[in-house]
Image (cartoon, rainbow, N blue to C red):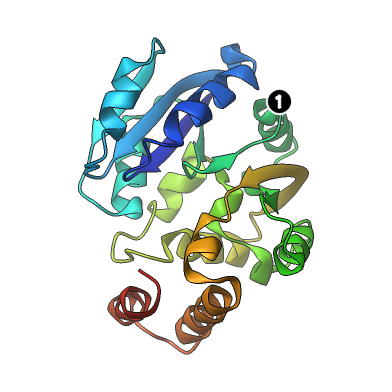
Amino acid sequence: MISIIIPVLNESKTIKDLLFHLIDNASLNTISEIIVVDGGSTDGTQNVVKSLDLNIILLDSKKGRAKQMNLGALKAKGDIFYFLHADSFPPNRYDKYILDEVKKGNNAGCFRMQFESMHWWLRLASWLTQFSWRACRGGDQSQFITRTLFEDIGGYDEDYIIYEDNILINELYSRKEFVVINKKIRTSARLYKKVGIWKLQYHFWTIYVKRWLGASADEMLAYYEKHIN
């Protein structure tokens, strides 16, 4: 059984569509529960979730995706955790693809990604995510991982306010526990549109290099807040 865990902060515009999408595109007998973990939304996100006639678990958490996702995992009942951003829509029958990989012995992985943009760079970046190269990974591609492996790693590192997805992915790659499912998850390009494609890409690369050179979680967060947030 799969537990879907969605960390949110001010996602009232997208959360309804995502929840219906998750239900419409899976065999519900494979889904243990859908857990939305709110980090202190002020735009009515929680009210949107509560207003839906769906069996959704809504949790309150301290702000920070790592904290939110760990809390969701703590409350989850499934054998497999599926962590998903609120603006990323997995492919039809996503549950089957995940279960098929776990049955093969692949205990963690993601889908390839397709940005909702026609810009040539984002189309190229999307195309590259089909390959297993570490540099092509990111949280927008979602993350499935067995409960056993997640608990063995110790979950998400809550010292990281940003880059928390990549810290977990680094550990999975070091253990050779990662597979890319060659099906597309659609994700929003809203941050690229807001900040600017080349500006944001430059800053993302800079953060990646800073981490490679040994920057601390606080140093990376300070850079992100100064240049992106």
Residue that numbered label 1 is attached to? 93
Q: Is residue 116 above or below residue 94?
A: below
Check disc 1 and report its element: helix, strand or loop: loop
Quadrant in the picture for the N terminus: top right
Residue for point 68% across, 55% down: 117
Tell me the quarter of the picture where residue 96 sits. Answer: top right
Query: Along the horizontal axis of the image, is 21 left or right of 98?
Result: left
User: Percent x, y for residue 94?
Assistant: 67, 31
Query: Along the horizontal axis of the image, is 29 left or right of 158?
Result: right
Query: Along the horizontal axis of the image, is 85 left or right of 182?
Result: left
Front residue (pair 17, 19): 17
Front residue (pair 84, 9): 9
Task: Tell me which amino acid carries mark 1.
Answer: Arg
Q: Is residue 75 visible?
A: yes
Tell me the quarter of the picture where residue 23 sits. Answer: top right
Q: How many marks?
A: 1
Residue for point 32% across, 63% down: 161
Q: Is residue 35 above or below residue 186?
A: above
Front residue (pair 22, 214): 22
Residue for point 36% across, 78% down: 220
Residue for point 56% across, 81% down: 202
Quadrant in the picture for the C terminus: bottom left
Q: Is residue 171 visible?
A: no
User: Percent x, y for residue 170?
Assistant: 54, 66
Classify mark 1: residues with Cα within 10 Å, few (<14), some (14-19) or many (20+): few
User: Percent x, y for residue 132?
Assistant: 75, 61
User: Percent x, y for residue 147?
Assistant: 47, 38
Q: Is residue 69 above or below residue 94?
A: below
